[in-house]
Amino acid sequence: MDFNAPDSIQDLQYFGEYGGVNPSISDSSTYTFLNAKTMFDTFEGNTEGCYLYSRHSSPSNLYLGEALAALEGTESANVTASGMGAITAVILQLCSSGDHIVSSRTIYGGTYAFMKNFLKRFSIEVSFIDITEPEVVAAAIRPNTRMIYCESVSNPLLEVADIPALSRLGKSNNIPLVVDNTFTPLSIAPARLGADIVIHSLTKFINGTSDTVA
């Protein structure tokens, strides 16, 4: 990773409201506006630097999202309440009823349970395959496949995905590659290797002290 790049984490420095070296924590659910039009524009997503409701965004989430985007070298990052919240949001954004997912067979238990037990309710089918064998992945792709899903290093079996090879497969079939990079932040940068979407559970290595779910 090029830490001299202008969008690196070292270039992101926000100070607290009263001069603290860390940004202040915003714990409000809603935010005030001096006029109704600004509130309307913010709700429509047409303003920068304004906040309406913390479920949409907050200054604290914005700071974190910008740091994560710099970490992974992506255009932007969205913050959710949990890793499974992020995974669920990505899957339901990319897939509809009747679609198909090619997924690694060795993934986080919560992800496996969601894909195996819950996606069938939405008529979304999942093929669990050996992600370390690109030819097996290629053979599993169907006309209705909408996602290739894997973990850069799997939890808990530590299988390593060949992200560049999977990316080439995805791009040749117009299928996004989604990579869970929870186990390997700073060590592996999936977006730089060709992944289209990168997911983290911040509870693990990024948080480091097991006192936060995000």
Image (tube, helix red, strand yellow):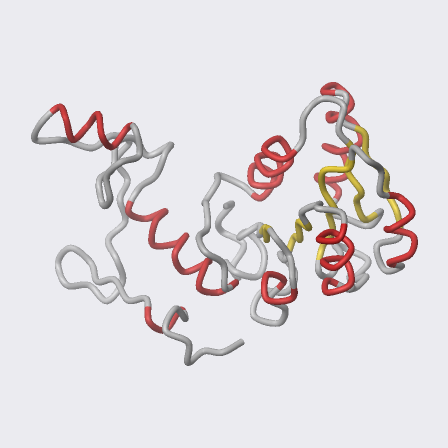
Q: Considering only vertical position in the picture, is 24 above or below 146?
A: below
Q: Is residue 212 left or right of residue 148?
A: left
Q: Find residue 136 and report its horizontal and vertical position in percent.
A: 92, 52
| Residue ranking furthest to the left | 34
Rendered residue at 56%/36% (across/down):
85
Q: Is residue 44 left or right of residue 97?
A: left
Q: Considering only vertical position in the picture, is 137 above or below 161?
A: above
Q: Find residue 108 and report its horizontal and vertical position in percent.
A: 73, 47
Rendered residue at 57%/35% (across/down):
89
Q: Find residue 188 and report its horizontal and vertical position in percent.
A: 63, 68
Q: Nearer the viewer, residue 159 or 96?
A: 96
Q: Is residue 20 left or right of residue 182?
A: left
Rendered residue at 62%/40% (across/down):
87
What quarter of the picture does the N terminus occupy? bottom right
Rendered residue at 41%/80% (across/down):
4
- Examine the image and state in which quarter residue 181 appears: bottom right
| Residue ranking furthest to the bottom | 4
Q: Find residue 204 and report its horizontal and vertical position in percent.
A: 58, 56
Tally the marks: 0
